[in-house]
Amino acid sequence: MSSRQAWIDINKELQAICEKMVARLSPRVERDELISWEHIVVGFFKKGTRTLRATNILIEDGLWEQAQILARVLFELRVNVDCFVIMAAEDDVAVCHRVIDSMMLEKIKQLEASNYAGLDMLSGRPTRQDFQKTLKEIQSCYLSGEIAKLRKYGFTGLSIENRAKRAGHEDAYQIVYRNFSRNVHSTDYVEHLGGPSITGENFHREYVDSRDTVTLYVAHFSAGGIAEFTNFALRCDMDAELDEIGRKQKMLREKE
């Protein structure tokens, strides 16, 4: 069995563990109507679990380039979660407000860019005035420079590169995030223009195998790290399952 197939199998196992955790967490959160620290952690975790599942589905269908895009999303999410943990240790209430406020600012920015197009198509919708009122309320809580950072970068107020540095993932950012970005922005077509004929058969085969293995590892590292934090923070009692998957992936990495 190739290293690539082993990573595919272990990521499917991780997906099953994460989905089991989601099922345990959802009822607990739904009983509480207020947005809390736990709600935000579960939100991060659910996004990570669904994105891992989507990545696995794309890989199963042989859509590796598209899977790289989602692996990039997972990596950014892992960075965001790690930054959230750092900021929560400093002030957990403040960081929760920043998460919610930054998401609302992003939504308002999108509405403003389209001149609120389509808003009137939703029944029982908030009005333009409602969003503008919310914007003023958020703006009153931050300095103008901080508002600009929240609108541009999200709750951390940092670029993804600086987020990765703060979370200790700078090397992964330089190697993975930048490389996978070429697929998000559709600026590289070499694999669709007869890759082996351009790069040579042997090099292309080695490149594809390496590329795919990195994609699988990044997805695992990202989703697995989020799962470990969620299990610890929300006491999901999945220590044995996560320890076992951690043991398997460590053995796999040592064989590389």
Image (spheres, grey):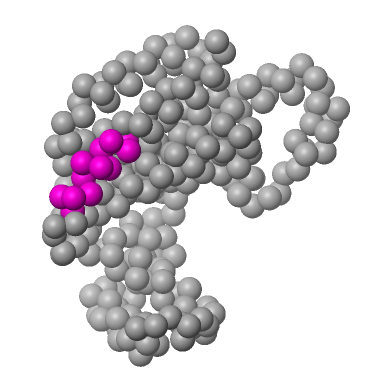
x and y percentages locating residue 218 in the rendered image: 47, 32
The answer to whether residue 147 is magenta is no
Q: Is 145 drawn above or below residue 4 in the view shown?
A: below
Q: Nearer the viewer, residue 139 or 219?
A: 219
Q: Residue at x 51, y 13 (%)?
A: 256
x and y percent of residue 149 in the render?
39, 65
Q: Image check: 200 left or right of 215? A: right
Q: Is the stretch drawn in magenta largely helix, strand or loop?
A: helix
For residue 136, side relative to residue 190 (left or right): left
Left of 227 or right of it: where is 92? Answer: left
Q: Residue at x 46, y 22 (%)?
A: 9
Q: Nearer the viewer, residue 231 or 96?
A: 231
From the top left corner, tell me how far across and down residue 100 is, in percent: 28, 65
- Name the residue: 55% across, 24% down: 213
Residue 54 position in % (x across, y down): 49, 42
Q: Is residue 195 visible?
A: yes
The magenta segment is 18-29
Task: Name the outermost residue toward the right.
Answer: 197
Closer-to-camera residue (222/4): 4
Placement of the N terminus among the 4 image quadrants: top right
Q: Is residue 93 visible?
A: no
Query: Toward which corner of the image does residue 63 lie, by quadrant?
Result: top right
In the rendered image, the vertical position of residue 34 relative to residue 246, given as above or below: below
Between 77 and 54, the one nearer to me in the picture: 54
Residue at x 54%, y 19% (from the top left corner): 5
Residue sitting at the far bottom: 129
Q: How many marks?
A: 0
